[in-house]
Image: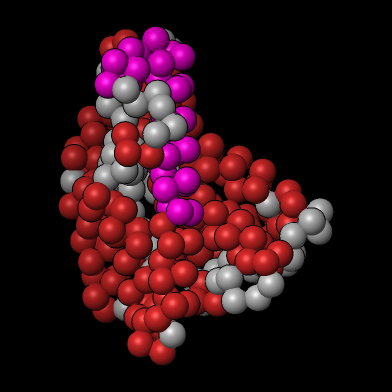
């Protein structure tokens, strides 16, 4: 993300700083809502772990993972501090686990569509949040600046939602999918998920190093389609 805008740091330092601040705020909002939702649903289903650790909170400090946040700032992909969940305390068994996992991405999706309402109604200027346009954030009028900020909040919430639904551990998609795996395939699925973090890191590193754009090629069309649906463009 910001790594791709380093030329802006040289050409227009003020714009780069402005972009960095807005991106950071957007990320903090997206990650905080995401992890808070995991904690709320887990608590609602009977697991007291998150509440005991103070994770049922909208305080960003409780949810930010330093390395995950840096990855989001630099590469556009990242994560928050995982909410600890004890499946033994959850009601509804595997379904409960899937509901807790799905709560994060669904909350980001909901927030994106809520923030998009003023744009869709014309109360703010038009915005088309995407990776190719982020360098131009807040370069117009005050109203257009607010639209740009809203646009990046929409973008990062949708990005976090879609990225986290990839069915590889430690992403939420692996737990959501777990609720649908037939009992006879559970062992094989669990073996795959034990290698999930290594597979995911490997994909991200190869993709980023070689500039293949594989991840964005997969999730980008979904993010763009959701963005168009949210802002009505």
Location of the N terminus by quadrant is bottom left
Residue shown at 29% from the left, 59% from the top: 71
Q: In which quarter of the view is residue 111 placed?
A: top right
- The answer to whether residue 165 is above or below residue 183 is below
Image mark count: 0
Residue at the bottom extreme of this rendering:
11
Task: Check if residue 55 falls in the magenta segment.
Answer: no
- Relative to residue 195, is residue 24 depicted above or below? below
Q: Residue at x 46, y 14 (%)?
A: 44
In magenta stretch: residue 47: yes
Which residue is located at x 41 percent, y 27 percent?
Answer: 57
Residue 71 appears left or right of 7: left
Q: Is residue 10 left or right of residue 123?
A: left
Q: Would you place residue 190 above or below residue 28 in this image? A: above
Is 71 placed left or right of 142 in the picture? left
Q: Residue at x 24, y 75 (%)?
A: 209
**Considering depth in this image, is 187 or 228 the residue closer to the camera?**
228
**Residue 164: x, y in percent?**
41, 46
Specify the segment rendered in magenta: 25-53
Kindly indicate the quadrant of the structure image that contains residue 154. bottom right
Does residue 100 show up?
yes
Q: Choose between 169 and 46: the one closer to the eye.
A: 46
Quadrant in which the C terminus appears: bottom right
């Amino acid at each position: 993300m910001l790594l791709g805008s380093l030329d802006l740091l040289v050409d227009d330092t003020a714009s780069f700083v402005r972009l960095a601040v807005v991106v950071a705020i957007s990320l903090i909002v997206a990650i905080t809502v995401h992890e808070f939702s995991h904690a709320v649903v887990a608590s609602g289903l009977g697991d007291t772990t998150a509440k005991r650790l103070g994770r049922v909170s909208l305080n960003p400090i409780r949810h930010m993972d330093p390395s995950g946040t840096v990855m989001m700032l630099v590469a556009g992909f990242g994560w928050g501090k995982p909410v600890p969940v004890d499946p033994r305390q959850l009601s509804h068994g595997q379904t409960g686990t899937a509901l807790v996992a799905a709560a994060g991405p669904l909350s980001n999706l909901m927030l994106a569509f809520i923030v998009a309402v003023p744009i869709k109604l014309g109360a703010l200027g038009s915005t088309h949040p995407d990776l190719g346009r982020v360098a131009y954030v807040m370069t117009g009028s005050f109203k257009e600046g607010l639209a740009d900020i809203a646009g990046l909040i929409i973008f990062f919430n949708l990005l976090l939602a879609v990225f986290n639904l990839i069915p590889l551990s430690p992403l939420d998609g692996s737990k959501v999918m777990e609720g649908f795996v037939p009992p006879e395939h559970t062992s094989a699925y669990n073996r795959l998920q034990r290698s999930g973090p290594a597979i995911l890191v490997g994909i991200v590193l190869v993709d980023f190093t070689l500039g293949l754009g594989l991840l964005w090629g997969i999730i980008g069309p979904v993010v763009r389609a959701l963005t168009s649906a949210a802002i009505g463009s």
